[in-house]
Amino acid sequence: MSEPVVGGVAERFKELYGAEPEGVWAAPGRVNLIGEHTDYNDGFVMPFALPHVTVVAVSRREDGVLRLHSEDVEGGVVELRVDELNPGSDKNWTAYPAGVAWALRDAGHPVTGADIHLTSTVPSGAGLSSSAALEVAVALALNDLYELGLKGWQLARLCQRAENVYVGAPVGIMDQTASACCTAGHALFLDTRDLSQQQIPFDLAAEGMRLLVVDTQVKHEHSTGEYGKRRAGCEKGAALLGVEALRDVPYDGLDAALARLGNEEEVRRLVRHIVTENHRVEQTVALLEAGETRAIGPVLVEGHASLRDDFRISCPELDLVVDTALSAGAIGARMTGGGFGGSAIVLAETTDVDTITKAVREAFAAAGFTAPRVFEAVPSAGARRLS
Ligand code: ADP
Ligand code: MG
């Protein structure tokens, strides 16, 4: 994040609240390389942080008042009282930062108020986790200012609780952990059961490759309901198989598990996706560690097929990105994020990027779809203090 942005955010804070902020923090959005819908099955994920960040300027208050302002939303400063924060009561953007203050206080941390101003370069609602970027930026600021001494993974847990309980969105732990814990030039291999993590070198430019994010700019309406159904189906699968979570079904025990599920066709598909997807994360880690980056291409493509055919959360726009990119020479491609819209990722030789981008744009125009946003995703730093 360049200095002018920090300066701009601090200056705007002063205009709004009449004094310099005590500090400025940033937290990134993320894309998930592989490991989709595994995080609520206690499984493996492999996100990396984007250069796109949410930047917050914050000062403490001791009078129990929480003042919130976003440059990116219409409306002025919103004022709340920290001792009156009530989960589920706020349907606006302010629920995300207020939820973080609530989660910290609910965990016994002495947060007595704050003035907060923020702005973001993370596209909102594109499956790139602007919500986690916002939560983690605020959490890190409050952690520093109130000297709470919480580690990245602990802040991630509190942010997840803010989103689950205060905002009311049943999300897993991946997004917040990615935003809090990723490091530049690496993907984060995360075990969502115990939050153990490993930074896996993922410096594509050095190897003559690029990773593109194609934001389809669509969000199909049924996505929230369908997410709930997939979660419930996965829980049913675990219950029928007598395991705590689908994570506990080993890859080499998949056939036996599917046989046990008999004619539960829908559950069988979900189980097959989760078990094979966890395996794909492990394959990806092994290939990257062996320096065989190009060999992850087919793993990404298999992951897409599994999300499309077994988990059934793709959509025509995402399939068109993947099919077109592969026909135009991509090494691998798949949808990423929750599904039914949002973004796809494309792994490509640097020399093929322009051809692939053009092919995707033309295919979208020919299909009558909204023009996609295409940008390069460079594995970037996680949450940090800027000033
Ligand atoms: P995603 O996390 O994929 O971007 P979500 O629906 O989880 O999508 O989160 C988007 C929501 O987060 C927005 O609708 C808004 O309420 C909040 N949000 C994200 N970024 C900002 C911002 N810069 N200013 C205000 N609210 C934001
Ligand atoms: Mg989100």
Image (cartoon, grey):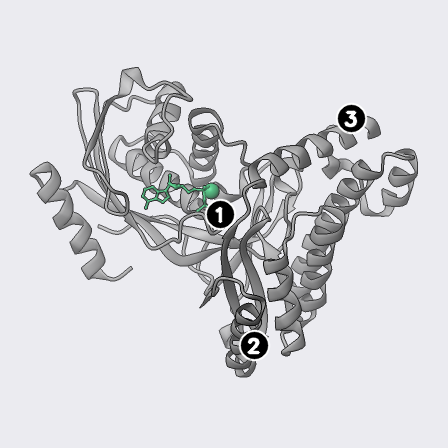
* Quadrant (top left, top right, bottom left, bottom right) of the N terminus: bottom left
The residue where tag 3 is placed is 239
Q: Is mark 2 within 8 Å of ligand 1?
A: no
The residue that appears at 28% across and 24% down in the rendered structure is: 111
Residue 159 image point, x, y percent: 43, 34
Q: Give amino acid for label 2.
A: Ala
Q: Are marks 1 and 2 in contact (CB under 8 Å)?
A: no
Residue placed under numbered mark 1 in the picture: 178
* Residue located at (17% from left, 23% from top): 62
Could you tell me how far apart the alpha carbons at marks 1 and 3 are, in whole angstroms?
29 Å
Residue 217, image x, y percentages:
47, 56
Q: Which badge, 2 or 3, comes first in the chain's sequence?
A: 3
The location of residue 44, given as percent across then percent down, is 65, 46
Q: Nearer the viewer, mark 2 or mark 3?
A: 2
| Label 2 residue SS | helix
Q: Amino acid at mark 1?
A: Ala
Residue bearing mark 2: 359
Pointer 2 local density, CA inside 10 Å: few below 14, some 14–19, many at least 20? some
* Residue 129 visible in the picture: yes
Say whether residue 117 is left or right of residue 44.
Answer: left
Residue depicted at x 40% and y 49%? 124
